[in-house]
Image (spheres, helix red, strand yellow):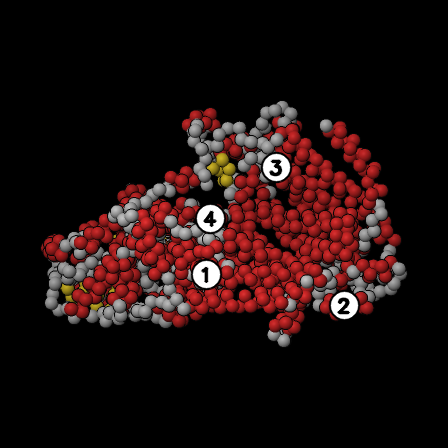
Amino acid sequence: MNNTKSAAVSNFDKQGDLPDAERHASAMQAFISEFGSRAASYMESCVRCGLCAEACHFYLTTGDEKYTPIHKIRPFEQAYLRHAGPFAPLYRFLGLTPPVNLEELERWEELIYDSCTLCGRCTLACPMGIDIAELVKEARHGMYSAGLVPDRLAHIVRNAEVKHSPFGEPADFRRTVRKIAKQHKVKIPLDAKRADLLLTTAPGDLEDNPQSVAAAARILNRLGISWTFSSDAFEATNFGYLSGNMELQKELTCRLIDKAREIGADTILLPECGHAYGAARWEAAQWYGGPTGVRILHMIEFLADRIESGAIELKKAKGSATFHDPCQLIRRGGLERAPRVILEALGFDLRELEDHGITAFCCGGGGGVLANARAEPLRLKAFELKKSQVEATKAEHFFTSCGQCRLQFTRGAQHFKWKKPIESLLEAVDAHMTAKR
Amino acid sequence: MIAFIEGPAWYAALTIFVVFSLWRLGWVLLMGGDKHKSPARASAAAGAIRNIFVDLAPRGAFLKRGKVWFVALAGYAFHLGLFAVLLFAAPHVDFIEQKLLGFGWTPMPYWGFIVTAEIAFAGLLLLWIRRFVDPVTRLISRLDDHLAAGLTFIVMLTGCLALGQQSVFLRGLHMGFVELWLVYFPFSSLFHTFTWPLSRGYSGALFGRRGIRA
Amino acid sequence: MRMLTIIALVMMVFAAPSAVSAQDFKAPVARSGPSGTAVTPPELVHPEQRLLHRGRDDISQIWRGVRMGERGTLSSKSLGTPVLVQSEGQLWRAARSTLLQTYGAYLLGLSALAVILFWLLRGRIRLKRERTGRLIERFTLSERVVHWYLAVVFLFLGVTGLILLFGRIILVPLVGKQGLAVFATAALHGHNLFGPLFALGVIAMLVLFGGDNLPKRVDFKWLVTGAGVLTGRHVPSWKFNAGEKIWFWVVIITGVAISASGLLLDFSFLATDLSQLQIAHFIHVSGALIAIAGAIAHIYLGTAGVEGALDSMVSGKVDETWAREHHELWAEASPETEASPETEAEETAGRTAPAE
Ligand code: SF4
Ligand code: SF4
């Protein structure tokens, strides 16, 4: 254990060719601008009890204390004490806290990006209620400004910036959608001038799970809703949110909302994706700069609602099922009930994981960790934890409702040659929906 | 000497405590926050209140971990013991009546004091020791955390040594450390005494607004 | 060398009584008694003592008065005697001064001497081979916490206890009689307060460490060969060697004796006879002296005396080399241990332990 610790020290990537002093300055600038009353209250409350470690899958599966959540934001905390806190001049004058230096930021890159999925489980274990997930996300803003982001993640962000989406340009999207429509024999409205509902999607679904896109289209069609995809606002994934690139986060957020308003849609429907929900449902107003005027719904929220209203009727399925709660939907999103409504309507005998609901374990791939190639060993450890809990339920089906979780599980299953298919609630609803209208 | 400790020094320490505590709290509260919030699913205020006053025991899922039990039990033992002693030890009640408020209340009986003090001591000792021997807390503990624990321990200890109440020296020693503690308080992690409702409140508001565990 | 120490010891025993026999200690029974049995001449109670009246009996005037035949009231008659100074008390005082103080001082001195001798003979015991950098868990977190909890409480009780026992001799020359009164009342209250915490620590210790300290066959070999000091060859042992096991049981046995007798002294209304309290006091002090003497050696061996020992109780981990050199059988059986040391030594030559 000790050996891996010393080996992992110089694990960082650097982007751009900013001089060191500027990198450092922009990181500090961004750090400092993050502090409001909320973050400051968190900084002022920690008693160093270490309970947050007891919640974090990365600490629990490695036993390495450097994965203690509060430790992951140390440079951020130092910046607070020296430059933003109530006694900042005192700290600087007496040298009570060393200044953050670039080398430290480089060393912390791994902790801030590779070993935090922004899952928020630690927040629930902290006796002071400190929301470390939010703090890590805020610390990423500074890291991004300094050009200290894992290369793979930076690469995806660049794609999102120049090519509209990590998936590709609007033309690529149009081509893919037509292909899916043809292959799955489903009508997919694209770039309609007016529609009530704007459907969005995620690159993972387009590439690896096109059947999921088809399923969403089929359900919306059956419900007789006026909806559309838009080739210049299809991307629900927000890599700005994940990487700490605030401008990109803002741009991606505004793009969706502006498009919805343009076509007169009152609802943006998000795909089965966790952090898309976190970014759009809970942070949109902040980046949009005011009320968006559009309802933002996650797919499972939408489905559960239509099932309860009777609009969707389902044939009963057989067998037992278990469900992985995606962090951004459940613990951070408040949708704990929705997937359970759907599973019950589907007639499955639900066998909950040992840790489920708001204290479920993260899949291990959220928060940009899945896109970060070098984090694979850590990801696999988290996967094993989930795998053992799934196996313990002896359930026949294993469901989730987030494309990122699904991808993380698929890759983990490949690695460990685990035969369990990872199923999507959306696709299950599609498969069991009776054609009513 | 004792006149100084119980007179000017006491008032000076109290002043520093009050002034800098207010400064720190005010600073944090006046930093401001996000202007725009996405539409709430449920009440943020209810969530905050719930997180501050209701959800005070570790959530079930974490009780599978021994350390969570340990910190919860030792933590509550220490804090409850400390507050009981602080507010209900007979000499403290006398002191509060004579020097602070002008009125007092019924103190604990002697045996009650002994039991509570023992509980508080055991809790503090166990928590402080863990700081040194658990790699996690060893890594994250700051000098401040040790000073805070150490000063609190000394204050409690000198208080108990002065139990006989016939030595002015011991009484002065206790008072002296209390003053040191008061001066250190607003600058240290002891300040979590006042900030915990803020930080729990902010997180609770987030839970509430998002309808988490609605 | 051993002969020499024995001679020195015998000489000291004979020389000592003259040094301490003049001691004039208060009868400890009434001193540490709870409010129920305390003697309360009303005119001696100061107003500020009305609430926490434990400890006011330290005021020496009370005793001067008592010894001069002044009558007081005994608020509890459970001990069956309204006599304030009984003749057993005199006997008791003699036993305490000569036996406990004298032999106690020797015991502690002897222990310190033994440590010094051991240090002169063996020096700091260092690792013979290179560290492998691979760590084996020796003590779990709970074991470490309980160990240090007991250690801290023990040290505090030891110091306060010694002040109570030897205060007159050692402190009066330093701080004067007035000063001693302060020290004594402080020590007494601290001692009484921390006592129950010690009892809990002993129980926790027994639960956590008891299993690994049961005697095994190899322990006899370890003992017979004098830990290999005589033969010059290391005697393998399991997690604890016979020396450590003996220390463990000394801690447990004296710990139980000290706790039980101490609790009786704390709650002396439970006693039905004064002599019970006197016996309890005797057991309490002699047990404590044995434990302190042992602790002196234990502290030396656990810190400066043996390289890597302290670390095992702080981080809980030891290097594989340490495990093999000190507790071979345990190291072999540990799941974390890798191949045998010979092949390993070559592989890891030149590799240093990580800084953390
Ligand atoms: S659990 Fe909370 S208070 Fe404890 S160390 Fe972690 S962040 Fe700090
Ligand atoms: S948010 Fe999740 S991954 Fe990040 S530190 Fe907390 S528990 Fe660990």
How packed is label 2: few (under 14 Cα within 10 Å), some, or many (20 or more)? few
Q: Is residue B93 left or right of A43 when viewed as pictured?
A: right
Specify whether residue A346 is in view. no
Which is more foreground, mark 1 or mark 4? 1
Q: Given the image, on which type of amino acid does mark 2 rest?
A: His
Q: Provide residue A12's location: percent of width, then percent of height.
A: 32, 45
Q: Provide residue B58's location: percent of width, then percent of height.
A: 46, 59
How packed is label 1: few (under 14 Cα within 10 Å), some, or many (20 or more)? some
Which sits in the foreground, C50 or A349? C50
SS label for mark 1? loop
How packed is label 4: few (under 14 Cα within 10 Å), some, or many (20 or more)? some
Q: Residue at x 14, y 54 (%)?
A: A169
SS label for mark 2? loop
Q: Given the image, on which type of amino acid does mark 4 rest?
A: Leu
> In the displayed image of the protein, which residue is found farthest to the top?
C231
Location of residue A242 (image quadrant): bottom left
SS label for mark 3? helix
Location of residue A400 (image quadrant): bottom left
Which sits in the foreground, C124 or B58? C124
Q: Which residue is mark 3?
A: C301
How packed is label 3: few (under 14 Cα within 10 Å), some, or many (20 or more)? some
The chain holding disc 2 is: C
